[in-house]
Image: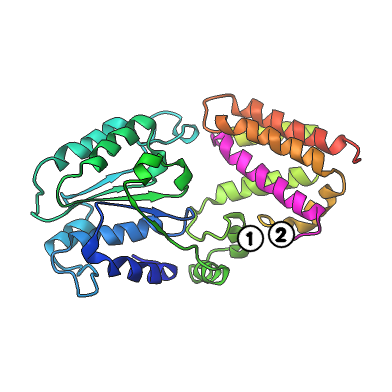
Amino acid sequence: MIYPWHTAAWHTLTANWYTQPNAWLFVGREHTGKTALAHHFAQALLCEQASAQHEPCGQCPSCHLFTQNAHPDFYTLTPEQPETDGSRKLLQIKIDAVRDVLEPLTQTSVRGGRRVVLVSPAESMNIQAANALLKMLEEPPAAVIFLLVSHNRDRVLPTIKSRCRQFALPTPSHHEALSFLQQHQIDNAENLLAFHSGAPLFDRQPENDVLRENLLDLLAEPRLLKILDYAAEFDKQKLPLAILLDWLQKWTIDVSLAAQKIQPLYYPHRAEQAQKIAVKTNPATLFQFSGCLNRLHPYGHHSLNVKMQTEYVLSEYLSLLTRKPH
């Protein structure tokens, strides 16, 4: 499917139908429908009776196979879920998965038409996998089109980007995104949309929403015993440290904005609490705390003691508030 905010982009894409590159790189904000558009594009490329506007017919054998996730000429590369402790591991596309896809591309297609390879997100390929794909992009087989999707093009190898036609997909406007959530009867839509930076297709995780609200309660009135209790609660959920760091970084940004009398970006329903915290600190200490978060960022998906790191970073936050503003 194509989401309403990508309709114009789809028309632009199909206007170049007869000058297809062998590789596309679709870029844009996460959770805004890029992969859905890439899937729609893949079905259109494989359709045996596409319309004059290059829409897939939905009726031909290829479309039937595609919608059943059984098309023999459509290949997908997505991050592998680790077998153990998966939620705390960085998900990657590894070289063996790339090789498994690239090998049949040297043979003829099953249906006698194009073959399509979808890689999403492209930045999740580790260096070995990226280099293996690069070799195929440098000398692509006939009638093979690669569709790469990226949430962060800066993390995609420059050599891969140079061999793709990059296509930026727009983020929905606030009105479009909010209307979408309301149409789907998402509770607390306004606040969730703010937290997810205006991207409406986020995964619904009510248990994480509750855990995040508990954190915000703690951040508004931090106490050492509450920190220890929260660290145990967070650790029990087996979430990666990266989740907590993201929540804290967004709160730090909102407090910094409150110090400048600017409305919060991520937690609008906590504006009053952010303002109260802002008057207890100063830009220098906020900057130091942000630096603490940044130093832990490389270990966000590391198999370290998450409970201990949670206690550490929240204790640093408590220490920040006990320092006298200059």
Looking at the image, is mark 2 or mark 1 earlier in the sequence?
A: 1
The image quarter in which residue 249 lies: top right
Q: Is residue 239 magenta?
A: yes
Q: Find disc 1 in the rendering and name its residue.
A: 191
- The residue wearing badge 2 is 269
The numbered dot on residue 81 is none
Identify the residue shown where x is 58% and y is 56%.
197
Q: Which residues are magenta?
A: 237-262
Judged left or right of residue 288, residue 99 is: left
Tell me the quadrant of the picture where the C terminus can be found: top right
User: Gap between marks 2 and 1, in whole Å?
Assistant: 7 Å
Q: Is residue 172 left or right of residue 141?
A: right
Q: Residue at x 13, y 64 (%)?
A: 48
Q: Nearer the viewer, residue 303 or 32?
A: 32
Q: Closer to the camera, 24 or 110?
A: 24
Task: Give whichever of 261, 22 is nearer the camera.
Answer: 22
Residue 136 can be seen in this image:
yes
| Label 1 Cα neighbours within 10 Å, binned few <14 / some 14-19 / many ≥20 | some
Secondary structure of the residue carrying numbered label 2 = helix
Q: Residue at x 30, y 31 (%)?
A: 95
Say above or below: 318 vs 74: above
